[in-house]
Amino acid sequence: MALPAPQLPIPASDAPAERRRVGVIDIGSNSIRLVVFAGATRAPLPIFNEKVLCGMGRRLHSTGKLDPDGVEQALANLPRFAAAAESLGVERLRVVGTAAIRDAIDGPAFIARVKETSGLKIETISGETEARLSALGLLSALPDADGAMGDLGGGSLELVRLDKGALGPQATLPLGPLRLNEAEREGDDIGEVVKETLAAMRWLPGLAGRTFYAIGGAWRALARIHQAHTEYRLRVIDGYRVDPDSFRDFLRLVARMSDAALKQLPDVPAKRLDTLRPAARILRHILNIGRPRHLVFSAQGLREGILFDDLPEAKRKEDPLLAAAADIARHFGRFAKLGPSLARWSDGLFKSESRAEKRLREAACLLSDIGWVDHPDYRAPLVFERALTMPLPGIDHPGRAFLAHALHARYEDESGSKQRKTAGALGLDGEALARARAIGQAIRLGYTIAAGRDDVLARTALGAGEKLLTLTVPRADGTFAGESVTKRLDQLARALELTPRLATRG
């Protein structure tokens, strides 16, 4: 029987309502960006992402107007963004303008020119709305985020306090890197400007012992440089967690560097060079005032918040990681129904797992068939790397390492030294590594039994006792006999340090 083709994102005209492609064009002080998503789902999958650094807010502080060169660059690129969105079948496109457009006296004129040259209608959002939507974008990935979020754009900083997922006080501050650079050229002490502006946020010291979530291109650039500088194993910014005290020293170093010195750092983006120093100063002052326990970088922000804001309340309550894993399985797997069945089938092996551990096991089950299109000899290492880097919200880097090891074990019995080294580098301890590999071995056994059919898997039961790992199958049913089943059962038993037992029932 021929295998079904992978279900790639389908054209908007043939898709159900929530699967129809949507897009957001974000026109900021420093950049314009188009992101197209496969659908307005709980964890929307980005399928197109393009940005241009225009710097329209570069002279706003002194002139009150948009930078003429930046305006022309934006006008030259926005028609392409509009054409790309149409070509990709986007059925709903939001175009939002932030700090530069709302603050510039010629903002309305720019909006009119954009409408005339590209047909795009810009929706200028207030600072309060920008702060709320950025916070919703973070919460779409981390529903229980606790501490504060900061979204640093070219012209402003949005701050929102978060209380275990609930939005608290929020503010929009004139602390964008482009604005500060201009103020410094005019003779202002921008260190004092940043310090005094942040001191007015009376709730910021309440960050002590909690987490600060950093969003925005300049801060992501700093995180990327830090990863390269420390030779960090995974170059994924989303979920990157660092110790604030040690990172503060790194920020102090960057803030004092010349352009020539900055260019010598690894992975420095040339077009963001002029924003790195002020961005470092702002973040360092936040850490000094707030004294958070953790600093976490997030790739989820304004654009994701716009989509999340439109979701029904029931949809918002879904787990973002599991929703994303289910979407990826539907697009790229063969047996979308088998993932949830595998999760239920393996429940009996992990009765004492925590809620967080169960969530990762369920995600591994949902993603367990993403390597089927690869050559069998390469599936395990390719899937390992894919799990580390795929667009999954709501997961930290140790969690990514856990999924990578579980999916590696789904295709290969033993992990190699490279995989074990990665585990340690990303904060996965030996106990978690062993558990991940046991989950992968259970998934491997489940696929062997089911042969792609969840109803076949449901006729069996898997359970673990103090000494025995028992697979119970229907009596006198040849479907469950054979070397492959017993071999996989033995491998799983070894992973769990149990004795395998094949039982029958009438």
Image: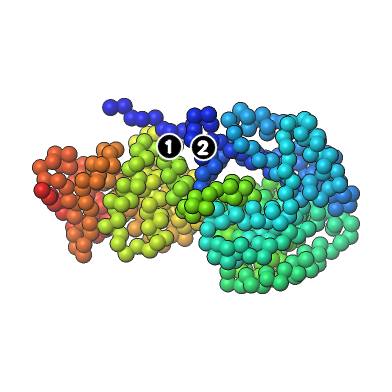
Residue 502 drawn at (x, y percent)? 15, 51
Figure check: 74 above or below 470: above
- Measuring 58% from the left and 69% from the top, which residue is drawn there? 210
- Measuring 61% from the left and 28% from the top, which residue is drawn there? 87
Q: Is residue 422 visible?
A: no
- Measuring 61% from the left and 72% from the top, which residue is drawn there? 208
Query: Horizontal placement of 439 versus 388: left or right?
Result: left
Between 285 and 228, the residue placed more toward the observer is: 285
Amino acid of disc 2: Ala
Query: How dense is the environment of label 1, judged by Cα within 10 Å: few (below 14), some, or many (20 and up)?
Result: many
The residue that mark 1 highlights is 332
Residue 222 drawn at (x, y percent)? 66, 54
- Separation of marks 2 and 1 at Cα, in angstroms: 20 Å
Figure check: 76 above or below 128: above
Query: Quarter of the image containing the N terminus?
Result: top left
Q: Earlier in the sequence, mark 2 or mark 1?
A: 2
Query: Horizontal placement of 77 versus 308: left or right?
Result: right
Between 452 and 422, the residue placed more toward the observer is: 452
Q: Are marks 2 and 1 in contact (CB under 8 Å)?
A: no
Residue 358 drawn at (x, y percent)? 37, 58
Label 1 secondary element: helix
Closer to viewer: mark 2 or mark 1: 2
Figure check: 505 above or below 198: above
The residue that mark 2 highlights is 17
